[in-house]
Amino acid sequence: MGAQGVADKTDIDPELVPGARNTIEVCLQLKPNERITIITDEATRDIATALQAEVERVDSNFSVSTLEHHTRYPLKFTPEIVAETYQGLNPVTS
């Protein structure tokens, strides 16, 4: 399923895979028919890439937003394009 991602999955740090898998499978219990939004920044892009790979493995729909692509630091508000992702959703975590 999927959507636009953050990076080439060959760049995933193998040390991040267990934590990403635990986050998606155990903490969030993400299912194939669910949708997830990953909000990241350049400093945590490698973590977002590992999470994205696990979401793709589960075959869930997803979107990824990198904050620096939409606004400048320091953040004073949620960028509109990121906030739009949440419209009409019932998030289980934030």
Image: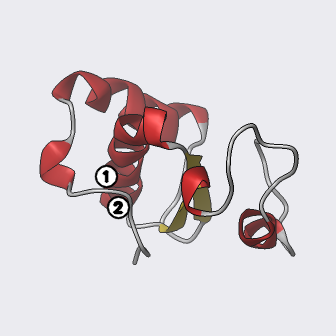
* Left or right: 90, with 28 as reference point: right
Rounded to the nearest angstrom, the CA distance separating label 1 from label 2 is: 5 Å
Q: Amino acid at mark 2?
A: Glu
Write down the residue under mark 1: 53
Q: Could you say whether the residue bearing mark 1 is in a helix, strand or loop?
A: helix
Q: Amino acid at mark 1?
A: Ala
Q: Quadrant of residue 4?
A: bottom left
Position of residue 87 measured from the top left corner of the image (x, y, whole percent)? 85, 73
Quadrant containing the C terminus in the rendered view = top right
Give the quarter of the figure containing the N terminus: bottom left
- Left or right: where does residue 94 sit relative to residue 11? right
Dot label at residue 45: none
Q: Nearer the viewer, residue 9 or 81?
A: 81
Q: Is residue 79 left or right of residue 71?
A: right
Dot 2, crowdedness within 10 Å: few (<14), some or many (≥20)? some
Q: As rendered, which of 80 and 26 lies closer to the eye? A: 80
Cβ atoms at labels 1 and 2 below 8 Å apart: yes
Q: Is 25 rendered above or below residue 66?
A: above
Tell me residue 11's x, y (percent): 16, 44
Residue plotted at (21% across, 31% down)? 13
The image's mark for residue 56 is 2
